Image (spheres, grey):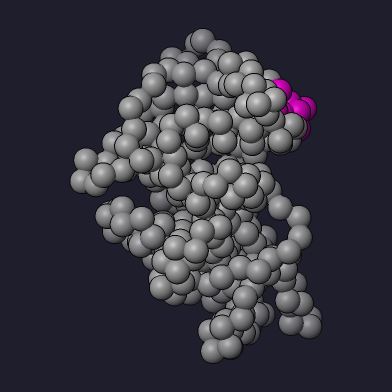
Amino acid sequence: MADEARAGDDRQKYLEFQERPTLRKPIMIAAFEGWNDAAEAASASMRFLQEAWGAPRFASIDPEEFYDFTETRPTVRLVDGRQRRIDWPANELYYHADQARDRDIVLLAGVEPQLKWRAFTRLLLDVAKDLGVTTFISLGALLADVPHARPSRVSVSATDEELRKRLGSLGTRGSRYEGPTGIVGVLQDACQEAGIPGASLWGHAPHYLSASPNPQVTLGILRRLDELLDLKLDLHELAEEAETFVAQVNEAVAQDPEATSFIRQLEAQDDEEDEDDEDEAETFRRPPRGSSTGGLIQDVEDFLRRRRGDEQ
């Protein structure tokens, strides 16, 4: 009773509703910018869903208690070229009424909080219960020693036996990762404790492209999500964007024999893992002796920035 009362108090203090939609057996999909979002792949996946569905916002969380604003600073921008506006770190809830099916979708687009994770988790769990959420799906992305030109690997974990079977049948790679976790790991654990079935999908982003938005990884996450939930997403434009991105990286790498050799070794290791069906942790193998991944990162990033500038 005390936990329920505390959750209710948190909701009144921190949650603001713009509207209260009536939802049918909703599935909640969550993604957070920050530690869980290598190459911006998870947050880009969330933006894709919001835009594809034109999902309206129905609630937002007051950021005051959950962020250190000297670390995650608000930003200022000009509206109509004159009026200044402050944008604070946002955690916002959207919904999609899925007319083709007997259930709806709730989207949680956020920024990983720095403070009061347990209060933040209680708040979201309380909202999920009030909305009648039947399944919680989190999206994330990690840096790994994977080659950029291969289809993105997606590690998965699930708290529900039926979901585990479904994910296994899709040919996704299970995760047995142990170590530091982010807010998505905490939320997934909380959902399990509350009896809400959940799953987590993690795209693997090449560590030597860490600073670039990577549509190849975003595509991998969305394909797995589409297969899992039968969303019927139109991913053709994203697939073309990913193909162009890979071609540009290939062009950059081809100018450096050392980089070419390094990536060929990654591809060989990737092939070995496919044969052995090993799980991949959030760690890197040691690069080939004499190689400089730091230099490779800088060279590729510089090349991609120049190409983007030429295309504008």
Residue 118 found in image quarter: top right
Picture quarter containing residue 87? top right
Give the quadrant of residue 206.
bottom right
Horizontal arrangement in the rendering, residue 105 relative to residue 260 (left or right): left
Q: Nearer the viewer, residue 303 or 284?
A: 284
Q: Is residue 245 visible?
A: no
> Which residue occupies the foreground of this view, 169 or 87?
169
Residue 278 appears left or right of 19: right
**Residue occupying image coordinates x 56% and y 70%:** 174
| Residue 290 point in image, percent of width and height | 79, 81
Q: Which of 303 and 183 lies nearest the eye of the viewer?
A: 183
Residue drawn at point x = 46 percent, y = 18 percent: 17
Image quarter (top left, top right, bottom left or bottom right) of the C terminus: top left
Q: Locate residue 234, reporting x and y percent.
A: 28, 54
Q: Give the magenta part as a residue range.
A: 65-71
Quadrant where the N terminus is found in the figure = top right
